[in-house]
Image (cartoon, grey):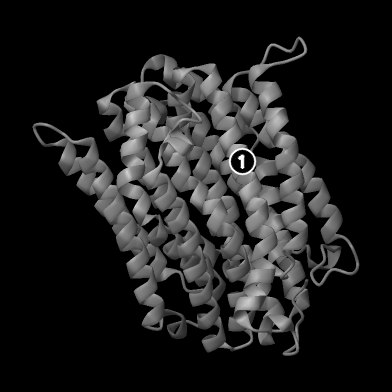
Amino acid sequence: MTAATTTASPLLTEAPLRLLVRMAGPSALAFLVQAFVSMAETGFIARLGLAHLAAMAIMLPAVMLMQMLANGAIGGAVSSAVARALGRGDRAAAGALIWHALAIGLLAAAAFAAIYAVFGRTLLSATGAPSAVVELAHGYGHVLFLGLAPIWVSALLTSVVRGTGDMQFPARLMIVGSVIQIPLSGLLMLGAFGFPGLGLQGSAFALIAVSSVSCLLLFWKLRQRDRPVRLSMEGRRLKLAYFADILRVGALAALSPVATVLTVALLNTLIGRFGVETLAGYGIVARVEFLLVPLVFGIGAALTALVGVNMGAGQVARAERIGWIGGASAAALAGVVGLVLAIAPGLWTDLFTHEPTSASAGALYLHIVGPFFAFQGLGLALYFASQGAGAVQWPIIATLMRFGICVGGAWLVMRQPEPSLAGVYACIALGMLTYGVVTGLALWRGAWRRRPA
């Protein structure tokens, strides 16, 4: 399905719930399949040993930052810009935005690769992890960051396609990529058929390979003549106005994943004081929270396009209604996951470790934090919807409040004579609660009506 540029478009007229279900369904399924990639890779890492699990725990924030920036913050801004251009009926501008998205992706990949080359080892050492763990993490990061270009480009081109309202092709691409990535990761990490295996680095090589193939398929798709937005030479001239259209939303939205990842990174440092086993346990369950991002993104990708095209057409009340429906759906999805794991944490932790201290640390997190996943789901969905509206100020404020509560509260807990891991986890739960409530209140108070689309 594609976004038409007239008021007859179903994106502007169809019942919001039915429309959201139809558009979010393929993406939600695709991101659910992709979540199995993360689960499978965690299982492969567990087979490599406890040190590898700890290494992935301290690298996880950087990995998720790249994915959340490329697919969420900047990717969402690209989708929003394309959708709003189509809502205005400006297909030429929507096509030109493809070239600007490509430029942003390549520049971002180069910038982050340079930052990691200079500061990567220092930042990893600052976590306080043992030197052997730092070396494993640094080797993984070295491969990943050198291969960021196809990861960024595939993410932003996928966002262009989603901005047109086409959720089917990106979903199929993700599902096929996931099916390939799981066995490829296992082969490259663990080895088989005489191949010795590359350890953690194999996971990075697999991601880069799958992303490279995705890039080629996306270029092919966007060159087809029947596309509502087409990659053509006419729009190749770069203009400041188009960069501004993307980055006025994307630059501010980027603060959200940065704050989220900083939260996990600093919590890694604090929780690491309880020992490597506890850190590994936290790393296992922290992946659950990060898995909420792709699960909710199935709904969020549709929200960005739907809200964007309706805001572009001046249908603010309809855009708000779509936002509330999507937010409630995401809260229900994340809430069910959180409650199930809070009641039976072994469903997750037993997949990756049977070491008593690690399993206990992971189970405690899910007992305390799991019931608050619903608020995280609500906040995330409204963050994506707010990108479509071009009004991300309040989701960012809510994210910064969450950062202060989680990290500040955990730091105070660790300063006590007898620090409590449960106290640290309680701060994380309170941060999630604040994030969802503040983001929801902002929409209820009319945050989208105070900013032009």
Quarter of the picture holding the N terminus: bottom right
Q: Quadrant of residue 445?
A: bottom left
Image height of 122 relative to 87, above or below? above
Residue extending furthest front? 343
Q: Residue at x 72, y 82 (%)?
A: 10
Coordinates of residue 335 in the picture (x, y in percent): 43, 58
Residue closest to the far right: 225
Residue 351: image x %, image y %?
51, 31
Residue at which label 1 appears: 36
Please give the count of numbered marks on the rendered protein: 1
Image position of 259 (left or right of 142): left
Image quadrant in which you'd find residue 392: bottom left
Q: Position of residue 171 (x, y in %)?
A: 72, 55
Establish if 410 lies above or below 120: below
- Residue type at mark 1 is Phe
| Viewer-proximal residue among 173 and 337 | 337
Q: Residue at x 71, y 70 (%)?
A: 165
Residue 329 visible from this viewpoint: yes
Q: How far from the left and from the top, in percent, is residue 36? A: 61, 41
Indicate the secondary structure of the residue bearing disc 1.
helix
Which quarter of the image is occupied by the C terminus?
bottom right
Q: Is residue 239 visible?
A: no
Asked if residue 190 is positioned above or below residue 388 in the image, the reply reads: above
Q: Nearer the viewer, residue 104 or 293?
A: 293
Q: Is 253 displayed left or right of 312 in the figure?
A: left
Residue at horizontal 77 percent and vertical 77 percent from the top: 91
Give the class, few, some or many, for how many residues have Cα within 10 Å of label 1's Cα (few <14, many ≥20): some
